[in-house]
Amino acid sequence: MIKIEDVKKSLLVSVWFIFLTFPIMVIRVNPIEKIIQWRWDNLIMVGVGSFILSFVWRYLLERKELGTNKDTDSSEISVSWSQKLFEDRRLYIPTLAGLAVFVVLFPFVFSVYQISIMTTALIYVVLGLGLNIVVGLAGLLDLGYVAFYAVGAYAYALLNYHFGLGFWAVLPVGAALGALFGILLGFPVLRLRGDYLAIVTLGFGEIIRLILENWNEFSFGPSGIANIPRPGFFGLELSLETANIYMYFLMIALALFTIAVVNRLQNSRIGRAWIALREDEIACQAMGIDKTRTKLTAFALGATWAGMMGVIFAAKTTFINPASFTFLESAMILSIVVLGGMGSITGVILGALLLILLPEYLRAFSDYRMILFGAAMVVMMVFRPQGIISNVRRRYQFKGSSQSGDAQP
């Protein structure tokens, strides 16, 4: 039932939004004809829209609070739809089979453009999974992740330009250089956490970008490096379409490899140490976990995937320059991890596909892209801060009979 108090609050919100947007949405100055145009229809739209959205926002907040109280009162552990999907063999086996058929048939059904943007989305899937190690598992906020991406890309471009090294020779070199730079960044920030760690990593990313932009003798500056060769296939000459399909399947293989490795790491001894470090650093240290090694391992392994994807990116686009490695790229990869669900492999994959593919398919709304992106992030943080698919905590249930005293995990 609608209360008078709610109407008053929504009216107040509506007036406030009209006041804030008045200079932008209502007044238009034409300097050529020297006239001022008053767009009162925009004022009405802003007022009505903010009034309705305020009602919807308040209704959703009340629903969220009711759901939270219900979960607190209930003693049973609620199971999400994603958890049900992954635990029931009758559901996830047909789903995986259907997905595998779609992935294999995709490049033969869709156009070159569709294959290209899907390959880009897969690159961001792997980047998201790499950053998920640092941010999602170890809880270390890294805002300079794109620097390792740039290290891998420039490693391939420069080694190919100066020494003629091919893609397959440089791919492990890019991964190794990414890991090395991850360790170099990890050492100075061992004692930092939270906001201070974020500022230092942000500075590291900017230092790398500024070096690439200003050291012309080394990186060719803003002009970048062109004519980077695509990966070869046993010496065969590939057309543009065939090369795109080849890159697509290469990225599918690398994404599957990354998922397998990250999944094994997550359940390994070092993975449990990362989660312990994320939950409580002091308690983690008190339990005998080597904090230095744990942090450095997280930085090095996360940066390894970024270095590898940098090589792939340089080979895909055949041209790189410092403008490809700005802070916005780091923010986008971090958004993929946060939106998908920190620590969740499936969530990060879904987040990467949504954030990279949706802007391509919704180009009609390209002018409002950043507004929609910001609004989506605000809504997610308020109503689902754990992400689209939250990480499922391992649960152990004691099952034992009082007579025999046997216990099963």
Image (tube, rainbow, N blue to C red):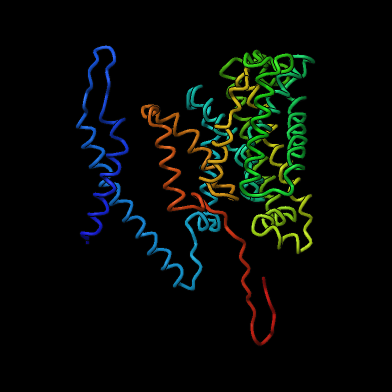
- Residue in the picture at 39% in, 62% down: 65
Q: Reply above or below: 92 against 363.
A: below
Of the 4 image quadrants, the one containing the N terminus is: bottom left
Q: Is residue 349 above or below residue 220?
A: below
Classify residue 279 as left or right of residue 385: right
Tell which of 41 and 399 is nearer to you. 41
Rendering coords of residue 397 (x, y %):
61, 71
**Whole-percent x and y of residue 349?**
55, 42
Residue at left offset 22%, top offset 18%: 35
Q: What residue appears at the point 66 percent right and 87 percent down from the top-left corner?
A: 403
Total numbered circles? 0
In this rendered view, identify the residue nearer to me: 320 or 398.
320
**Residue toward you, 177 or 236:** 177
Q: Residue placed at 51% from the left, 45% from the top? A: 339
Image quarter of residue 153: top right
> Where's residue 201, x and y in %?
66, 39
Residue 222 x, y percent position in the rendering: 62, 16
Q: Residue furthest front?
A: 34
The quarter of the picture where the C terminus appears is bottom right
**Is the residue 177 above or below the residue 243 in the image?**
below
